[in-house]
């Protein structure tokens, strides 16, 4: 702090007296042991202003600041006459207030003055507390207001987003682009591709490239009216095209892809013919995207059907395996029971001393043990089993056979199951071939007859357009050891009897 011309330093009366003409040097602070200055104390006074009296020193209050308050040094240049006059008025007002305060203390003794001072200090403390409480309340209210403002701003932002989305949805719906449960919506492998297709279609609609039309059409000599008419008719045509495309997607079957593609192409040609005067037509890129959507849908549905068929076949295989397992268990139980009977009979024969009967019984026990071992071996060898070649003239004609495999102990059980109520007549058996690798033999036959397969989509359908004689020649060429017995002509008793009665 430095001195200022025309002003003198005025220390409080409860501080030690300063030497005459002394000014606080720069960076000076009062001694911390000194009592605080009275509230509102003027540390700088004009030289010509001398206070008639000073207020009594206020008691030390630890809640008040102990340092010298920051008192700005009045400017002595550059403020002009108006600034000096205003400062003089402020000082005169302060002097008047101090004189009134001193006058109110005249006639009071020291105790009254101390009481009055203490009351004034309490009032100042209370006013400060009230001011702090008011400030806290205001800060709380300001915080609430700011939070509410932020909430309202968020609501406005969301509302604007909804408005934009609603406007865009309305625009797309005008063109017939709707959100519906697409067959690919839940297909993980196709979801990304479907999203790309939809985004591309929507972008084309927004850019007005989905439908192409004339731009120089006039109505009543007005280009604006002409453009409005062309725009309305274009939306109408696009709605019709999208309605047809959506219907084809929703009713798609894998085998209907070609007809659906042709139908959508004819719809596009019809729109081009009806809008010929205004050159209205569906854009090539838009049409290709919708065709790609049809292809994706058909491909997905084909895979779904293939998966369902695979599950059905797997369940059928598991049922077949379970039936074979139960047959093995029943056969082993029968053989073990039979072996037990032989052993009991052997003990009785040996007790009677019948050596000839005992020897014969031992042979039967050995045969039973060999049979049990054979069943265990069959059960352990999961590739062992019977390959069957069967046909059904009444259901499928003369030149069609089914070639399959079963692990049943009695393969005819499987053949009888295939000829249940799902076909009008029973199957005829051309060959039952046992093999240690029945799975490999069946696969070899299927590969050799691949070009004669009836169902080229589902490989688990084991029907082939070939005569029983053709299968016999193939078996003879593959391996002679498998072809022990083969019946070339089917009996077809039920079918032949039905033909005679008709």
Image (cartoon, rainbow, N blue to C red):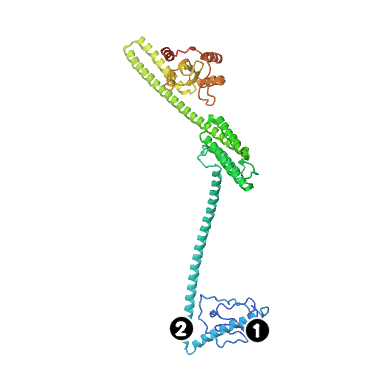
Q: Which mark is residue 6?
A: 1
Residue 172 seen: yes
Q: Callout 1 environment at 10 Å: few (<14), some (14 to 19), or many (20+)?
A: few
Tell me if residue 148 comes above or below residue 126 in the rendering. Answer: above
Q: Secondary structure at mark 2?
A: helix
Describe residue 216's horizontal placement relative to residue 133 as left or right.
right
Q: Position of residue 363 (x, y in %)?
A: 40, 13
Closer-to-camera residue (305/448)? 305
- Give the mark nearest the N terminus, 1 or 2: 1
- CA gap between label 1 and label 2 equals 37 Å
Describe residue 26's horizontal placement relative to residue 135 as left or right.
right
Direction front: furthest residue = 220
Q: Which residue: 39% across, 15% down? A: 365
Closer-to-camera residue (233/304)? 233
Q: Which mark is residue 15?
A: none
Tell me if residue 125 comes above or below residue 389 in the rendering. Answer: below
Quadrant position of residue 498:
top left
Q: Quadrant of the N terminus?
A: bottom right
Residue 16 seen: no
């Amino acid at each position: 702090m430095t001195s200022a011309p025309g002003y003198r330093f005025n220390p409080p009366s409860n501080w030690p007296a300063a030497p005459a003409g002394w000014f606080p040097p720069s960076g000076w602070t009062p001694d911390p042991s000194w009592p605080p200055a009275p509230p509102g104390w003027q540390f700088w006074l004009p030289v010509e202003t001398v206070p008639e009296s000073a207020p009594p020193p206020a008691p030390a209050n630890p809640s008040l600041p102990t340092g010298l308050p920051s008192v700005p040094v009045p400017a002595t240049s550059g403020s002009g006459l108006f600034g000096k006059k205003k400062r003089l008025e402020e000082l005169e007002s302060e002097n008047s207030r101090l004189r009134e305060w001193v006058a109110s203390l005249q006639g009071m003794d020291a105790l009254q003055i101390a009481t009055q001072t203490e009351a004034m200090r309490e009032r100042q403390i209370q006013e400060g507390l009230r001011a702090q409480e008011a400030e806290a309340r205001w800060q709380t209210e300001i915080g609430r207001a700011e939070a509410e403002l932020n909430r309202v701003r968020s609501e406005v932002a969301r509302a604007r987003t909804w408005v934009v989305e609603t406007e865009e949805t309305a625009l797309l719906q005008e063109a017939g682009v709707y959100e519906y449960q697409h067959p690919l919506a839940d297909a993980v492998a196709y979801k990304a591709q479907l999203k790309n297709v939809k985004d591309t279609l929507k972008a084309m609609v927004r850019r007005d490239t989905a439908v192409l039309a004339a731009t120089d059409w006039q109505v009543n000599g007005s280009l604006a009216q002409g453009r409005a008419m062309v725009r309305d008719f274009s939306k109408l045509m696009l709605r019709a095209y999208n309605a047809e495309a959506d219907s084809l997607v929703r009713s798609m079957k894998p085998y209907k892809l070609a007809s659906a593609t042709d139908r959508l192409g004819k719809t596009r040609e019809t729109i081009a013919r009806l809008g010929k005067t205004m050159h209205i037509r569906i854009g090539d890129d838009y049409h290709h995207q919708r065709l790609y959507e049809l292809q994706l849908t058909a491909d997905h549905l084909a895979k779904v059907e293939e998966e369902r068929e695979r599950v059905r076949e797997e369940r059928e295989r598991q049922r077949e395996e379970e039936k074979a397992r139960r047959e093995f268990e029943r056969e082993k139980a029968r053989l073990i029971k039979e072996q037990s009977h032989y052993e009991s009979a052997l003990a009785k024969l040996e007790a009677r001393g019948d050596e000839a009967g005992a020897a014969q019984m031992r042979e039967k026990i050995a045969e039973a043990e060999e049979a049990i071992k054979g069943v265990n071996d069959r059960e352990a060898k999961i590739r062992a089993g019977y390959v069957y070649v069967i046909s059904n003239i009444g259901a499928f004609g003369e030149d069609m056979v089914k070639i399959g495999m079963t692990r049943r102990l009695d393969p005819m059980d499987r053949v009888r199951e295939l000829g249940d109520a799902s076909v009008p007549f029973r199957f005829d058996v051309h060959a039952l071939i046992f093999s240690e690798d029945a799975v490999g033999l069946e696969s070899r036959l299927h590969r050799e007859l691949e070009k004669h397969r009836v169902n080229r989509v589902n490989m688990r359908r084991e029907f082939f357009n070939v005569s029983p004689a053709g299968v016999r020649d193939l078996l003879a060429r593959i391996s002679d050891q498998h072809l022990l017995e083969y019946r070339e002509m089917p009996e077809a008793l039920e079918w032949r009897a039905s033909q005679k009665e008709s």
